[in-house]
Image: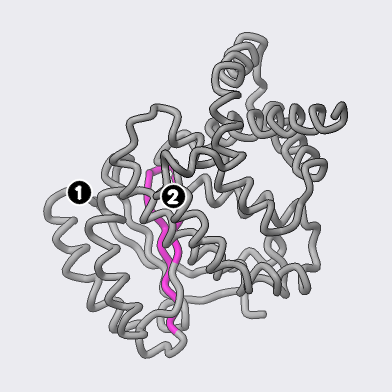
Amino acid sequence: MERNFFIGSKWLYYKIYTGTKTADLILVEKLQPIIEELKRNNSIQKWFFIRYNDPDQHIRIRFYCDNPENIFIVISKLLPILNSLLHQNIIWKVQTDTYQRELERYGNKTMEESETLFFNNSEMMLNYLFLKRSFKNNEMEFLFSFILIDSFLNAFSLDNIHKLKLMNNLQTSFKKAFNTDKAFKKEIDNHFRESSKEIHYFLCGKAIKDYPEVYKIINENLNQNSKTILTIKNKLEIELDDFLSSHIHMMLNRQYTSKQRMYELIIYDHLYKYYKTLNYERSIN
């Protein structure tokens, strides 16, 4: 499995330096139309993005061209857009870099499938970022995360006990990393208590009649991933929980424009408590 791809190979990798508030605008209004055109023309087969600080805020975006000659088509299509954004001071720097696959993290045998998951998730997130503009419920971003993660775990056939174990490990490690104090724990406990009925309403699927578009984009993503997930389940050579944790981390990185790790902590905490309650209720019935 090839690890490194520099400019001129099958993967083209850009770092686009911009502010927190402008990142979503660039993705949805500037890059998405170009990406759709490149896909239609079969110039690219996959692409994905992540948000990053090094320490400056930027979007990392990667394009896969089955035919490396198409890299130059991608560059020529992006050039006027990026040049215009630079002149408007919406972005302040653009770099190309070497794409180094994280083979240890995603598995040597499942790296290409992971890139397909990245691709499908990035496509879904562009739809989400557009949809987010219409949200009137202040908790909707969290609720979207809960549905997305729960659906992803269902796709890998995790039962509630396994989900509980995974979320417990994640929320425990994040709380240690953040060195959370009693005041913060009390705050997120209160937030869960206030949100628990709504979380249940969304995760049991009843909210679909109120938010059909939210469920639609998540279900479309699941359908796109179904064959890839089946392949991963058959080929995976690393621990499943590690693999799932890495992908969930990347999903949340794409969803939230800033403070991603803080949001991760809250989401893992709330899902842990939700699954714990669910398992308890099932054990006494």
Query: Which quarter of the rendering shows the N terminus?
Result: bottom right
Q: Amino acid at mark 1?
A: Ile
The relative height of residue 40 versus residue 274 in the rendered view (above or below) is below
Residue 237: say if magenta.
no
* Residue at the spot 49% in from the left edge and 59% down from the top edge: 121
Location of residue 14 (image quadrant):
bottom left
Front position in the image: 182 or 89: 182
Rendered residue at 12%/55% (across/down): 87
Q: Residues within 10 Å of mark 2 (few under 14, many from 20)?
A: many
Magenta span: 48-65
Residue 254 sits above or below residue 231 on the image: above
Question: Is residue 59 within the magenta segment?
Answer: yes
- Can residue 100 be seen at all in this image of the molecule? no
Q: Quadrant of residue 228?
A: bottom right
Q: Which residue is mark 2?
A: 51
Please state which amino acid type lies under the numbered disc 2.
Arg
